[in-house]
Image (cartoon, rainbow, N blue to C red):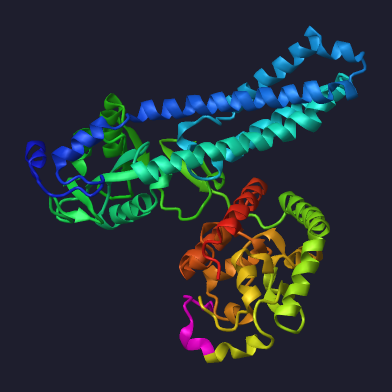
Amino acid sequence: MTTLDERRSIREPWPTMRHVATPEATLRALRRSMPRARWQTFYRDRVLLSDSLVVVLAVAAAHLLHWQQFADAPVRDGFGPWYWAISALLACLWISSLAMGRAYSTRTFGSGFTEYQRVFDSTWKLFGILAVVAFLASFGEARAYLLYAFPLGAVALVLTRYAWRKRLHRRRDVHGECMTTVVAIGHRDQAERLVERLNRHPYHGYRVVGLCVPDGEASLGETILDVPVLGDLSQAGEVAALVGATSVAVSGSDAMTADAVRSLGWELESAGVDLMLTAELADVAGARIHVTPATGVSLLHVDAPQFGGAKFLVKAIIDRVAAALLVVLLLPALLVVSIGVMIDDPGSPFFLQKRVGKGGSVFTMIKFRTMRAGSDREVSQLAAANEAAGVLFKVRADPRVTRLGRLLRKYSVDELPQLVNVLLGNMSLVGPRPPLEREVVQYGQRMRRRLLVKPGLTGLWQVTGRSDLSWDESVRLDVYYAENWTVLQDLLILAKTARAVVSSRGAY
């Protein structure tokens, strides 16, 4: 390997920065960009400010609009200093609860459900304690906060976090700003996997800008997925300083012993660079991973996914109640669509099809008919036009689809009758895509994991890309959901579904 000065003279392109052609230009761009501590502090302070505003407004709304309904004192006393002091104390405790629940950890900003989970958990735990204290102290006035401040504040906090996140994603995708620059260390294949996973989606906030691999696996200046090799494993600290990286990610490598990692950590500590150890645990949510210290070693525990218990009962209750409300609210629209389908193409307005549900059970799924009558018998004639991968059958310009059917598909209106399946317990509001029997016959072990939970009217596949997704990506998302879902994640997917439906992206 060459020296650090020799590496500075390399004139190979560094495509990790937009419109940059030389290492010197890359270094200048990196150094001009907002330092990690600065942008993270800037972002965190504004999130804290917006959270504080939401909390104050939620508590004030409960106080001003509804206090007099519950207070035993005269209405005029409800606006006295004592009651305002209680409201102010609750607002302060709420913000403190968010802070203690690590809702402002910079490591959760911008990706994953952890940020939302911490906000929600901190909120409900505070109000759970408030409910207990109010019961023990016979403080009936607390009902106003529990009935109004809690739901208003919880929803508004999650929505404002979502708005901040979308703004952060735009800055990352469009301008390449607010990124954590990473030097990846490990064997060539390990480094390549890390580059592929981190650089493929800029909105996650990580960009690999340099690689350090063992001697003999790659030459200096060679690029791996457009990222240059800048040194061997022993030169990681120098390379991180050279490119101004804010993190060093160590993939599993027999050359990186415990002593080597410890020494690297000491070297990076003085430079303020984070050290990350990558565990190749694909599609395992953070909530299932725990680190247990033992004598001289840290043990990484991965909890087995749960497919029963209290949270499934909560999910079933939410499914039935929400589906019943939606059926009542949408009944006039459902009747209008039914009539429109029959006018557009004579026959039944509904399409009934056998699908496979939880545990391999077969049920009849209901949809609005979007194709001419008897079109399901024409699949074999269109086999050559199939555009889908894997076991799916999809034709973008399917000639069997009616005029009204194209409109119904574009905005997923044809899926609404599946609310009846949710009421019957065959499906959930959120879950994997309900497969056909002929598809399940071709499933391998991994794909069968999708059948461990009920299929859903919408799911991760719906809010991620719908029919534009590859087969492998669709399977990965469904399996990830089955093994890692939470109630809060379901609520967020439902919120994102509305956006995906309006945009009609990937629907045909």
Instruction: Please give the name of the residue rendered at 64% of the width and 60% of the height, measured from the top-left corner.
Output: 458
In the shown orientation, is residue 146 left or right of residue 378? Answer: right
Q: Main secondary structure of the magenta part?
A: loop
Instruction: Please give the name of the residue rendered at 48% of the width and 66% of the height, measured from the top-left corner.
Output: 468
Magenta extent: 382-395
Q: Check the image and report above or below for 304 versus 39.
A: below
Of all residues shown, which one is farthest toward the bottom?
381
In the shown orientation, is residue 245 left or right of residue 93? Answer: left
Residue 435 shown in magenta: no
Instruction: Please give the name of the residue rendered at 78% of the width and 7% of the height, measured from the top-left corner.
Output: 81
Residue 16 shows in the view:
yes
Residue 237 shows in the view:
no
Rendering quarter of residue 70: top right
Q: Check the image and report above or below for 39 versus 473.
A: above
Q: Where is residue 75 in the image (x, y as percent from the top left)?
A: 89, 15
Name the one closer to the observer, 463 or 136.
Answer: 463
Of all residues shown, which one is farthest toward the top?
81
**Quarter of the figure that contains the C terminus:** bottom right
Q: Position of residue 11 (x, y in %)?
A: 9, 46
Q: Position of residue 216 (x, y in %)?
A: 14, 55
